[in-house]
Image (spheres, rainbow, N blue to C red):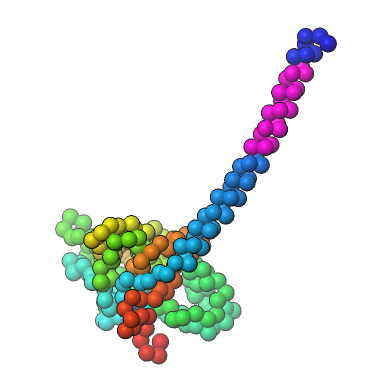
Protein backbone atom coordinates (compact mmCIF):
# COMPACT_ATOMS: atom_id res chain seq x y z
CA UNK A 1 0.00 0.00 0.00
CA UNK A 2 1.38 3.36 -0.99
CA UNK A 3 1.88 6.20 1.44
CA UNK A 4 -1.02 8.06 -0.14
CA UNK A 5 -3.30 5.05 0.35
CA UNK A 6 -2.21 4.69 3.96
CA UNK A 7 -2.93 8.38 4.62
CA UNK A 8 -6.35 8.04 2.92
CA UNK A 9 -7.18 5.01 5.06
CA UNK A 10 -6.19 6.90 8.21
CA UNK A 11 -8.34 9.88 7.22
CA UNK A 12 -11.36 7.64 6.57
CA UNK A 13 -10.83 5.83 9.88
CA UNK A 14 -10.60 9.18 11.66
CA UNK A 15 -13.80 10.39 9.98
CA UNK A 16 -15.63 7.19 10.94
CA UNK A 17 -14.44 7.55 14.52
CA UNK A 18 -15.53 11.21 14.62
CA UNK A 19 -18.96 10.25 13.29
CA UNK A 20 -19.33 7.52 15.90
CA UNK A 21 -18.28 9.90 18.68
CA UNK A 22 -20.66 12.62 17.49
CA UNK A 23 -23.49 10.08 17.32
CA UNK A 24 -22.75 8.92 20.85
CA UNK A 25 -22.57 12.51 22.11
CA UNK A 26 -25.97 13.13 20.52
CA UNK A 27 -27.39 10.11 22.33
CA UNK A 28 -25.89 11.28 25.62
CA UNK A 29 -27.29 14.81 25.13
CA UNK A 30 -30.78 13.36 24.56
CA UNK A 31 -30.51 11.23 27.70
CA UNK A 32 -29.29 14.20 29.76
CA UNK A 33 -32.11 16.39 28.40
CA UNK A 34 -34.72 13.74 29.22
CA UNK A 35 -33.26 13.25 32.72
CA UNK A 36 -33.23 17.02 33.31
CA UNK A 37 -36.89 17.34 32.30
CA UNK A 38 -37.80 14.39 34.52
CA UNK A 39 -35.94 15.93 37.45
CA UNK A 40 -37.54 19.35 36.91
CA UNK A 41 -41.00 17.73 36.83
CA UNK A 42 -40.19 15.86 40.04
CA UNK A 43 -39.09 19.06 41.79
CA UNK A 44 -42.23 20.92 40.66
CA UNK A 45 -44.54 18.15 41.85
CA UNK A 46 -42.65 17.76 45.13
CA UNK A 47 -43.04 21.45 45.89
CA UNK A 48 -46.78 21.30 45.26
CA UNK A 49 -47.12 18.27 47.52
CA UNK A 50 -45.99 20.39 50.47
CA UNK A 51 -48.72 22.20 52.40
CA UNK A 52 -49.12 25.77 51.07
CA UNK A 53 -51.01 28.28 53.20
CA UNK A 54 -52.17 31.77 52.38
CA UNK A 55 -50.81 34.53 54.60
CA UNK A 56 -52.90 37.34 53.11
CA UNK A 57 -56.64 37.82 53.46
CA UNK A 58 -59.33 38.29 50.80
CA UNK A 59 -57.96 36.40 47.81
CA UNK A 60 -61.63 36.19 46.82
CA UNK A 61 -61.57 40.00 46.37
CA UNK A 62 -64.53 41.23 48.39
CA UNK A 63 -65.01 44.96 47.96
CA UNK A 64 -66.08 47.87 50.13
CA UNK A 65 -66.71 50.78 47.81
CA UNK A 66 -63.67 51.12 45.53
CA UNK A 67 -61.36 49.32 47.95
CA UNK A 68 -60.45 45.65 48.39
CA UNK A 69 -61.14 44.44 51.92
CA UNK A 70 -57.93 43.88 53.92
CA UNK A 71 -55.87 45.73 51.32
CA UNK A 72 -54.21 49.10 51.92
CA UNK A 73 -53.58 51.58 49.14
CA UNK A 74 -51.49 54.60 48.27
CA UNK A 75 -53.51 57.79 48.90
CA UNK A 76 -51.13 60.05 46.94
CA UNK A 77 -52.96 59.47 43.65
CA UNK A 78 -56.29 57.98 42.63
CA UNK A 79 -56.60 54.18 42.79
CA UNK A 80 -59.96 52.48 42.38
CA UNK A 81 -60.81 48.76 42.34
CA UNK A 82 -64.08 47.39 40.98
CA UNK A 83 -65.65 44.08 39.99
CA UNK A 84 -65.17 43.60 36.24
CA UNK A 85 -67.06 40.31 35.91
CA UNK A 86 -67.67 36.94 37.54
CA UNK A 87 -67.05 33.48 36.11
CA UNK A 88 -69.37 30.97 37.73
CA UNK A 89 -69.09 27.24 38.20
CA UNK A 90 -71.38 24.71 36.52
CA UNK A 91 -71.50 26.24 33.04
CA UNK A 92 -70.72 23.80 30.22
CA UNK A 93 -67.55 24.75 28.33
CA UNK A 94 -69.42 25.12 25.04
CA UNK A 95 -71.73 27.68 26.68
CA UNK A 96 -68.96 29.91 28.02
CA UNK A 97 -68.20 33.12 26.13
CA UNK A 98 -64.88 33.80 24.41
CA UNK A 99 -63.44 35.89 27.22
CA UNK A 100 -64.29 33.27 29.85
CA UNK A 101 -62.57 30.59 27.81
CA UNK A 102 -59.49 32.78 27.32
CA UNK A 103 -59.22 33.46 31.06
CA UNK A 104 -59.79 29.87 32.15
CA UNK A 105 -57.33 28.48 29.59
CA UNK A 106 -54.63 30.81 30.88
CA UNK A 107 -55.42 29.71 34.44
CA UNK A 108 -54.77 26.08 33.51
CA UNK A 109 -58.51 25.31 33.55
CA UNK A 110 -59.16 24.58 29.88
CA UNK A 111 -62.49 22.76 29.49
CA UNK A 112 -63.25 22.83 33.22
CA UNK A 113 -66.94 23.08 34.16
CA UNK A 114 -66.87 22.97 37.97
CA UNK A 115 -64.62 24.85 40.38
CA UNK A 116 -64.68 26.61 43.75
CA UNK A 117 -65.22 29.43 44.50
CA UNK A 118 -66.59 31.43 41.59
CA UNK A 119 -63.92 33.59 39.97
CA UNK A 120 -64.17 37.33 40.54
CA UNK A 121 -62.28 39.24 37.86
CA UNK A 122 -61.24 42.59 39.30
CA UNK A 123 -60.31 45.88 37.64
CA UNK A 124 -57.77 48.33 39.05
CA UNK A 125 -57.66 51.83 37.56
CA UNK A 126 -55.15 54.49 38.56
CA UNK A 127 -54.76 58.14 37.56
CA UNK A 128 -52.85 61.23 38.58
CA UNK A 129 -49.55 59.53 39.35
CA UNK A 130 -46.55 61.90 39.14
CA UNK A 131 -43.18 60.19 39.29
CA UNK A 132 -41.36 63.25 40.63
CA UNK A 133 -43.83 63.71 43.50
CA UNK A 134 -45.51 60.43 44.40
CA UNK A 135 -44.37 57.04 45.62
CA UNK A 136 -45.21 54.50 42.90
CA UNK A 137 -46.73 51.74 45.06
CA UNK A 138 -50.43 50.94 44.61
CA UNK A 139 -52.29 48.45 46.84
CA UNK A 140 -51.07 45.64 49.08
CA UNK A 141 -52.70 42.94 51.21
CA UNK A 142 -52.76 42.99 54.99
CA UNK A 143 -51.32 41.62 57.16
CA UNK A 144 -47.86 42.06 55.71
CA UNK A 145 -46.12 39.01 54.29
CA UNK A 146 -43.91 37.12 56.73
CA UNK A 147 -40.61 36.42 54.98
CA UNK A 148 -38.95 34.22 57.59
CA UNK A 149 -38.97 31.49 54.94
CA UNK A 150 -39.80 31.28 51.25
CA UNK A 151 -42.99 32.99 50.04
CA UNK A 152 -44.76 33.24 46.70
CA UNK A 153 -46.69 36.35 45.64
CA UNK A 154 -48.85 35.96 42.53
CA UNK A 155 -52.10 36.45 40.63
CA UNK A 156 -53.55 36.02 37.15
CA UNK A 157 -53.70 39.32 35.29
CA UNK A 158 -54.01 41.21 32.02
CA UNK A 159 -52.78 44.74 31.35
CA UNK A 160 -55.31 46.96 29.58
CA UNK A 161 -53.37 50.23 29.47
CA UNK A 162 -50.47 52.03 31.08
CA UNK A 163 -47.59 50.29 32.86
CA UNK A 164 -47.59 48.49 36.20
CA UNK A 165 -45.23 45.82 37.53
CA UNK A 166 -43.68 44.04 40.48
CA UNK A 167 -44.96 41.69 43.20
CA UNK A 168 -48.20 39.90 42.21
CA UNK A 169 -48.26 41.79 38.90
CA UNK A 170 -44.66 40.95 38.01
CA UNK A 171 -44.38 40.25 34.26
CA UNK A 172 -47.99 41.26 33.50
CA UNK A 173 -48.66 41.64 29.74
CA UNK A 174 -51.60 42.53 27.50
CA UNK A 175 -52.57 38.85 27.48
CA UNK A 176 -54.05 36.87 30.36
CA UNK A 177 -51.46 34.90 32.28
CA UNK A 178 -49.81 34.03 35.57
CA UNK A 179 -47.84 36.86 37.19
CA UNK A 180 -45.75 37.08 40.33
CA UNK A 181 -42.49 36.21 42.01
CA UNK A 182 -40.89 33.95 44.62
CA UNK A 183 -39.00 35.58 47.47
CA UNK A 184 -36.58 34.11 49.99
CA UNK A 185 -36.27 35.99 53.24
CA UNK A 186 -34.76 35.60 56.67
CA UNK A 187 -35.58 35.93 60.37
CA UNK A 188 -37.72 38.99 61.11
CA UNK A 189 -38.18 40.04 57.49
CA UNK A 190 -41.54 41.11 56.06
CA UNK A 191 -43.03 42.33 52.79
CA UNK A 192 -45.43 44.95 51.49
CA UNK A 193 -46.64 43.11 48.38
CA UNK A 194 -47.51 46.19 46.33
CA UNK A 195 -47.24 46.43 42.54
CA UNK A 196 -45.81 49.73 41.32
CA UNK A 197 -47.08 51.97 38.52
CA UNK A 198 -44.87 53.53 35.89
CA UNK A 199 -47.34 55.76 34.04
CA UNK A 200 -49.70 58.63 34.92
CA UNK A 201 -52.79 56.52 34.23
CA UNK A 202 -53.58 52.90 33.52
CA UNK A 203 -55.82 49.90 33.99
CA UNK A 204 -55.23 46.24 34.81
CA UNK A 205 -57.48 43.21 35.35
CA UNK A 206 -56.54 40.62 37.95
CA UNK A 207 -57.69 37.43 39.72
CA UNK A 208 -56.71 35.76 43.04
CA UNK A 209 -53.91 38.05 44.31
CA UNK A 210 -52.24 36.61 47.41
CA UNK A 211 -49.15 35.95 49.48
CA UNK A 212 -48.58 32.28 50.37
CA UNK A 213 -45.98 30.48 52.47
CA UNK A 214 -43.83 28.19 50.37
CA UNK A 215 -42.67 27.88 46.77
CA UNK A 216 -45.27 27.77 43.99
CA UNK A 217 -43.81 27.32 40.46
CA UNK A 218 -44.73 30.35 38.32
CA UNK A 219 -44.67 28.90 34.82
CA UNK A 220 -47.14 30.80 32.59
CA UNK A 221 -47.30 27.86 30.18
CA UNK A 222 -48.27 25.43 32.96
CA UNK A 223 -49.88 27.53 35.73
CA UNK A 224 -50.16 26.02 39.22
CA UNK A 225 -51.37 29.11 41.12
CA UNK A 226 -54.68 28.45 42.82
CA UNK A 227 -57.14 29.53 45.48
CA UNK A 228 -55.24 28.74 48.67
CA UNK A 229 -56.53 27.91 52.16
CA UNK A 230 -55.96 30.71 54.64
CA UNK A 231 -54.19 30.56 58.00
CA UNK A 232 -57.11 32.56 59.42
CA UNK A 233 -59.42 29.80 60.62
CA UNK A 234 -62.53 31.89 61.18
CA UNK A 235 -63.08 32.40 57.46
CA UNK A 236 -60.39 30.46 55.59
CA UNK A 237 -61.76 31.17 52.13
CA UNK A 238 -62.94 34.77 52.62
CA UNK A 239 -66.08 33.89 50.67
CA UNK A 240 -69.31 35.64 51.47
CA UNK A 241 -72.34 33.45 52.31
CA UNK A 242 -74.10 32.21 49.19
CA UNK A 243 -71.12 32.87 46.93
Residue that sits furthest to the bottom in the current view? 242
Q: Tell me what residue is drawn at x 69 percent, y 36 percent.
A: 23
Q: How many marks?
A: 0
Q: Nearer the viewer, residue 31 or 142?
A: 31
Q: Nearer the viewer, residue 195 or 153?
A: 153
Quarter of the figure with residue 164: bottom left
Q: Is residue 23 visible from the viewing direction of this image?
A: yes
Quarter of the figure with residue 55: bottom left
- Magenta stretch: dominant SS? helix
Q: Which residues are magenta?
A: 8-25
Q: Tell me what residue is drawn at x 33 percent, y 57 percent.
A: 184
Q: Tell me what residue is drawn at x 58 percent, y 50 percent.
A: 35
Residue 186 location, x and y as percent?
A: 28, 57
Residue 170 location, x and y as percent?
A: 36, 59
Residue 232 in the image: above or below residue 15? below
Residue 48 in the image: above or below residue 235? above
Q: Quadrant of the C terminus?
A: bottom left
Q: Quadrant of the N terminus?
A: top right
Residue 11 in the image: above or below residue 185? above
Residue 76 in the image: above or below residue 29? below
User: Residue 198 lies in magenta, yes or no?
Assistant: no
Residue 36 location, x and y as percent?
A: 55, 50
Residue that sits furthest to the top in the current view? 2
115 lies left or right of 239? right
Residue that sits furthest to the right in the current view? 1
Amino acid sequence: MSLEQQIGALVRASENLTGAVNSKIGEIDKEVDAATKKFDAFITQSRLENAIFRQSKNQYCNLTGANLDYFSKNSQFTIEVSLYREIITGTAWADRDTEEKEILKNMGMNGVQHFQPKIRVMKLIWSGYQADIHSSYTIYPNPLGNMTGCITVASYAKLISGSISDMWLNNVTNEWGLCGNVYRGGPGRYMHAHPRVNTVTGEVLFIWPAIVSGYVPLDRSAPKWGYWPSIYGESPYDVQPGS
